[in-house]
Image (cartoon, rainbow, N blue to C red):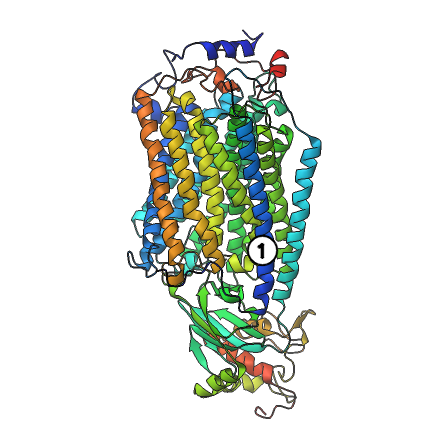
């Protein structure tokens, strides 16, 4: 069989769709078999359930925010409530949805399968990561329920350490605990990618999804301890007034910002790199081409991870940070834009002379490329020192990071979910509905967030409950867009769940995609592969020449 | 709700136009590349759409030349952005000489302003146009950020530090004043308006607001009340250094270092006197932490700034 893996794949593609009798979903039944599972695929599904919950909790807060901002007066909820809404929206979405989203769900499911392994290197640790994540999330939810949290997701001192009357400690503990889940997942991926690649699967034969997850894991392992330390210091400060961030006893509130952004800026790349990995897989499959400039795209991921650690000071151009430090941070921030540009250009070039089809995952990839381009380019405004003075802490920055986080990462996540859904569950979703939802999300997203760029340059500060009347029209547009976006997110919920039972049987490889994960049955068997595959080609062997090489 | 639906902010300071120019440059570059990518994706997706399920495109692995182009061109463009932005930022960081000094204290949730002639206002700032104004700002509690969109300027105000911000208004009128750094419950209400007046009207406004004493007078009163005057005297038996004519000049410390006698050093010496002792003087000064407000500190500084070597009021 190993003599011709391609033939093997071709045969599968031509066979009528089938589902294996035994696979990871029906190997065993009962709650215990899920809660004590060590199968990376089942753990991925545990994450899928939990982060979907947090996505809708965070989304619910966003709905209330947009409803409140329909009018300038601040008449729906009180200021205290409004501040809690945007804080919890941020905390839920960032720490409990975006950071785990692609790595913990798709990464968990696919990293072992893409490299021809039976599982991650440390399956028990993987399960522990999920439990730690859930415990952290419970603390954060506890904070939301008991006392709320009104510090903004950024927890700036001395507001968070001395002045806020809300439940900062519980939320900070939640972030602290969840961080360990991130660290352990990152560690697991790094070891797995180093040690468990199938025979013949050299570094430059790896799918770009793996490169992206490798870079992401580096950030998780190296950056997350810093946010953990920061959260511990905030808690100590609240309980004992140790004074690290309190100038009255010789501390400095700015130290918090340095520590916080030292993690939280790289964390932005935790939230986008895996998305870039997903897009590379989708573009290659639906253009039926190898990714243009494969090595450049792979190295760009590492470059982003490394340079991303050196730009945190661009969040502090308006503080007492020295003018010269700000200049260096500005310069480095421009440099980190280059690898992102490399990726966008290479994806675009991949379409050239390809065989492009417009199935749902590809629609999300198109959406990602467009929205990420806008999000990335508007980042240049914020890296530009003099312009940042005006747009810092306004809706401009809100629009910018939503273009990256929602327009980029959530698009990529949904694209990835649609791409690998047939692999995960063995069923196809209704393609018409899925394309429709992708379109609704794209339109709703732009209507929600594009007006916010204008609002920001007009000078509307972020985190404002009450705002001047002349900003109302743009805010109403944004809220209208948000309602469309909300519907757009609900549609896939319905048809994806529907498809679990009623969807057409997908077969092992409905997209005729390359990649080891597609050489397994759908859903895969518990140990992924009947026998360890041997790899003889580079990634994305979609073209005839490469096939004949075998 | 349609009453006034602006798409671009007013341009009412000397720097606003310069920042807008840079902004337009960025918008043009962004629009160009966004359209380029959109167009290429659109054209490629359409032209190379899948015509049959069996087609196999020829492989194209990449091109060093193209990679070089799309690394090099963005690099050059971003370096232009960086340089332009940095030069302008550097200018904005240095207040021009001879600026009108106004003192601002932020607290949850108001901006308290003191004019040198003693007028005080809350959540309003009256200023003359066509004259540089320098704000020296402090906060009594959390971080705030002083923001006037029409002037395109903003600066964080951090606990324990003075921040300065300068601008020169070019248009009369009323403009929004915001707090841009989230500071708690009523953050969105911490603000009001900047009223830019013709210099004559500004003078009229100053004389209209009945101030009991100027900022310097208030500072002089504090200097007496807090007992500063007992040690900081110009005679030979003084236990503390005389302050006349020293402000803005370098001071030699007992540690051998030299610091500039500026606002920050004055503040630190009042609140935490033992950290930087002037060479040749004993470490005897007690801290005044808790005894003086941020506004009082700014009054004292205004007073100390005004002291000339031949000052008569404090023998």
| Relative horizontal placement of residue A32, taking residue A196 as reference (left or right) | left
Residue B93: percent from the left, percent from the top?
A: 61, 65
Q: Chain of mark 1?
A: B
Q: Dot 1, how many residues are within 10 Å of its Cα: few (below 14), some (14-19), or many (20+)?
A: few
- Picture quadrant where residue A82 is located: bottom left
Residue located beneath label 1 in the image:
B24
Residue at 52% across, 44% down = A374
Looking at the rendering, in which quadrant would you find the C terminus of chain A?
top right
Q: Nearer the viewer, residue A134 or B49?
A: B49
| Relative horizontal placement of residue A236, taking residue A71 as reference (left or right) | right
- Residue A383 appears in the picture as rendered: no
- Residue A362 appears in the picture as rendered: yes
Residue B35: percent from the left, percent from the top?
A: 56, 42
| Relative horizontal placement of residue B19, taking residue A96 as reference (left or right) | right
Residue at 56% across, 77% down = B101
Residue at 41% across, 47% down = A448
Looking at the rendering, in which quadrant would you find the N terminus of chain A?
top right
Residue A122: percent from the left, percent from the top?
A: 48, 26
Is label 1 in a helix, a strand or a loop? helix
């Amino acid at each position: 069989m190993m003599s011709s893996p391609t033939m093997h794949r071709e045969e599968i593609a031509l066979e009528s769709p089938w589902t294996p009798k035994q696979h990871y979903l029906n190997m065993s039944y009962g709650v215990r078999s899920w809660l004590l599972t060590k199968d990376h695929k089942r753990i991925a599904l545990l994450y899928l359930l939990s982060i979907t919950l947090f996505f809708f909790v965070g989304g619910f807060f966003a709905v209330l925010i947009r409803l409140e901002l329909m009018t300038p007066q601040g008449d729906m909820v009180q200021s205290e409530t409004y501040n809690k809404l945007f804080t919890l929206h941020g905390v839920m979405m960032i720490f409990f949805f975006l950071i785990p989203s692609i790595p913990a769900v798709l990464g968990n499911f696919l990293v072992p399968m893409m490299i021809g392994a039976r599982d991650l290197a440390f399956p028990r640790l993987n399960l522990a990561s999920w439990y730690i994540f859930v415990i952290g999330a419970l603390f954060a939810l506890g904070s939301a329920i008991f006392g709320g949290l009104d510090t903004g997701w950024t927890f700036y001192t001395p507001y968070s350490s001395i002045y806020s009357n809300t439940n900062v400690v519980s939320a900070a503990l939640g972030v602290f605990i969840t961080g360990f889940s991130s660290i352990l997942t990152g560690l697991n991926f790094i070891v797995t990618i180093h040690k468990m690649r199938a025979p013949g699967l050299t570094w430059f034969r790896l799918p770009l999804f793996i490169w992206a997850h490798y870079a992401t894991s580096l950030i998780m392992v190296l950056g997350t301890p810093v946010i953990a330390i920061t959260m511990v210091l905030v808690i100590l400060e609240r309980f004992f007034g140790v004074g690290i961030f309190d100038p009255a006893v010789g501390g400095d509130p700015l130290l918090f910002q340095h520590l916080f952004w030292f993690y939280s800026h790289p964390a932005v790349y935790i939230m986008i790199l895996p998305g870039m990995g997903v897009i590379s897989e989708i573009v290659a499959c639906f253009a039926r081409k190898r990714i243009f400039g494969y090595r450049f795209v792979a190295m760009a991921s590492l470059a982003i991870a490394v340079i991303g650690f050196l730009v945190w000071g661009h969040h502090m151009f308006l503080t007492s940070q020295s003018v010269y430090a700000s200049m260096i941070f500005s310069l480095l921030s421009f440099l980190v834009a280059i690898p992102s540009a490399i990726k966008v250009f290479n994806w675009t070039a991949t379409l050239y002379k390809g065989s492009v089809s417009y199935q749902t995952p590809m629609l999300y990839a198109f959406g990602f490329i467009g929205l990420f381009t806008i999000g990335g380019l508007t980042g240049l405004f914020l890296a530009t020192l003099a312009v940042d003075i005006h747009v810092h802490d306004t809706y401009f920055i809100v629009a910018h990071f939503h273009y990256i986080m929602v327009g980029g990462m959530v698009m990529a996540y949904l694209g990835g979910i649609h791409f690998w859904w047939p692999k995960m569950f063995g069923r196809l979703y209704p393609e018409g509905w899925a394309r429709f939802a992708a379109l609704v999300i794209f339109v709703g997203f732009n209507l929600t967030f594009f007006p916010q760029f204008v609002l920001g340059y007009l000078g509307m500060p972020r985190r404002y409950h009450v705002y001047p009347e002349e900003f109302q029209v743009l805010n109403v547009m944004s809220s209208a867009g948000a309602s469309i976006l909300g519907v757009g997110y609900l549609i896939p919920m319905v048809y994806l769940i529907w498809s679990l039972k009623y969807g057409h049987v997908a077969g092992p490889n409905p997209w005729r995609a390359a990649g080891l994960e597609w050489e397994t049955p759908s859903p895969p068997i518990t140990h992924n592969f009947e026998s360890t595959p041997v790899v003889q080609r580079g990634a994305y062997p979609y073209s005839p020449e490469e096939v004949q090489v075998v | 709700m349609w009453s006034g639906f602006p798409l671009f902010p007013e341009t009412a300071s000397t720097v606003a136009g310069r920042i807008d120019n840079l902004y337009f440059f960025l918008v043009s570059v962004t629009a160009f590349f966004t359209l380029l990518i959109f167009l290429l994706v659109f054209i490629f997706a359409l032209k190379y759409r899948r015509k049959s399920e069996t087609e196999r495109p020829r492989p194209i692995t990449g091109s060093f030349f193209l990679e070089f182009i799309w690394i090099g061109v963005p690099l050059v463009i971003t370096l232009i952005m960086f340089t332009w932005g940095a030069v302008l930022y550097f200018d904005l960081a240095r207040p021009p000489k001879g600026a009108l000094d106004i003192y601002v204290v932020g607290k949850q949730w108001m901006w308290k302003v003191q004019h040198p002639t003693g007028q005080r206002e809350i959540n309003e700032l009256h200023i003359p146009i066509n004259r540089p104004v320098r704000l020296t700002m402090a906060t009594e509690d959390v971080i705030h950020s002083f923001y006037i969109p029409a002037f395109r300027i903003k600066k964080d105000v951090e606990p324990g530090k003075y921040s300065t911000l300068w601008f020169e208004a070019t248009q009369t009128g009323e403009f929004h004043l915001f707090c841009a750094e989230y500071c708690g419950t009523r953050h969105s209400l911490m603000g009001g308006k900047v009223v830019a007046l013709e210099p004559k009207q500004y003078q009229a406004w100053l004389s209209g607001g009945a101030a009991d004493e100027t900022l310097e007078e208030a500072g002089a009163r504090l200097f007496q009340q807090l007992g500063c005057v007992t040690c900081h005297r110009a005679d030979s038996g003084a236990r503390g250094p005389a302050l006349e004519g020293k402000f803005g000049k370098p001071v030699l410390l007992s540690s051998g270092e030299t610091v500039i006698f500026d606002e920050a050093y004055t503040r630190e010496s009042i609140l935490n006197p033992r950290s930087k002792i002037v060479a040749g003087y004993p470490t005897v000064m007690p801290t005044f932490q808790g005894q003086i407000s941020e506004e009082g500190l700014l009054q004292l500084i205004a007073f100390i700034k005004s002291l000339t070597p031949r000052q008569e009021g404090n023998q």
